[in-house]
Image (cartoon, grey):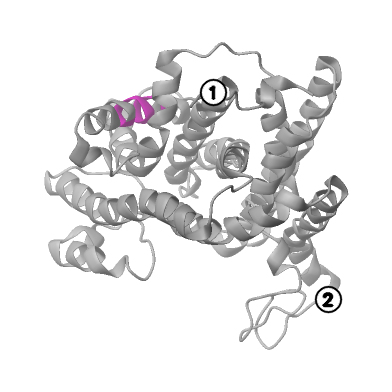
Amino acid sequence: MNTNLLPPDGRTHIAWVDLLRIFACFLVVLAHCCDPFVGNFADKTDFMSGALWGSFVRPCVPLFAMISGVLLFPVKMDMRTFYARRLKRVVVPLVVWSLALPLMYYAYFATGVQTQSPNIVMDSYTWTATAEKLYLWLFNFNYDTTPLWYLYMLVGLYLFMPIMGAWLNQAQRKDVKLFLWIWGVSMVLPIVQIAAPFLGYEGNYGSMGLLGVCLWNPYGMLYNFAGFMGYMVLGHYLVKYPLDWSWAKTWGISLLLLGVGYAMTSIGFFEMQKYFPGDYANLEIPWYFSGINVFMMTFAMFVLLSKVRVKGSRMMSRVAELTFGIYLCHFVLVQCSYDFVKYLDLPVPGYVQIPVIAVIAFLISLALVWLLSLTRLTRRSIM
């Protein structure tokens, strides 16, 4: 068994997991730096730059889900204790940043900043509009709080984890593999959803859902096997039953999966733009986190980084601890960094501007979160 994958007794940090958390967090920041470029349909270079980078970073959130599976499965405590420990670490940041992000956006644009981002509608940043956001978050996230969709989802996963954990505690390897195979089948559905209309499928009374999904039933046949819980189980499985692959085999298979997955994701996005120009409901299908193409990329990145013999350090562990906070606050700082780079009017194409913006936003977010971590009152909002 590859002990590099196993959490050492008595240690809080696992070096490769810390590295993976930092990598996944940077991919999230990079993903949101692509948004204004992808939204610029009038500029072909910007759009292609955003689409190509955006396709590459799709494994960002699935990697976080796999990390949770590594660290939290199997659940070895009763449901009440688990809920008390995990939910408070999500609910407090959800409330704080649902209020803070709209206020930060309002304050930023109140200074008179002009942005080139096609995603920004200035009428949404009056005080009246901002005040509404301060309570409407109870129903769902808004544009200012876009990254917080993950927290809503994470609460749902935490609610189910003790149940899944109890099963994993007694399940045989073949049983877990069967679950993962069925979950894998569910990830083909986005491709089927794209292909079905070309094969004559006209939907069901206005709904283009598949396998039982319709206007009055959002829960299709494979609903209970789909989504992020599968990634969490997969992360746990790959640690409990490590792949006995040589480095050559690991690189060969991983690069193949990464290449094929990326080609499917990027080409699929361009094709959807060709058939459904500017229609995000269809454009986003090749970018679904639960799509087989994104799974291939996620699996490849996880396997490669889990085999890295990285030596842990205090600095790396500290940055890894702060990644949750970076995730929470980075969105508004991406906006600031985008406007700054556009103001400089650098003579470089969008595919260079995007990683530059990402590095700036990541470092500023890291500095802000580090400051917030210094006092007990603000620490609870980021860790």
Rendering quarter of residue 32: top left
Amino acid tagged 2? Gly
**Residue at disc 2, secondary structure:** loop
> Along the line of sight, which residue is nearer the eye, 98 or 195?
98
Considering depth in this image, is 47 or 28 the residue closer to the camera?
A: 28
- Residue linked to disc 1: 19
Residue plotted at (71% across, 56% down)? 167
The quadrant of the image that shows the N terminus is: top right
| Residue underneath mark 2 | 200
Q: Which contiguous range is marked in magenta?
A: 359-365
Q: Which amino acid type corresponds to the residue marked 1 in the rendered image?
A: Leu
Give me the C-alpha separation between circle 2 and circle 1: 47 Å
Other residues around mark 1 within 10 Å, as few (<14) / some (14–19) / many (≥20): many
User: Relative to 245, is 231 on the left or the right?
Assistant: left
Against 31, residue 185 (above or below) is below
Residue 166 visible in the picture:
yes
Where is residue 87? Give x, y as percent.
41, 55
Q: How far across and down, in percent of the image, does residue 132 sit?
A: 22, 68
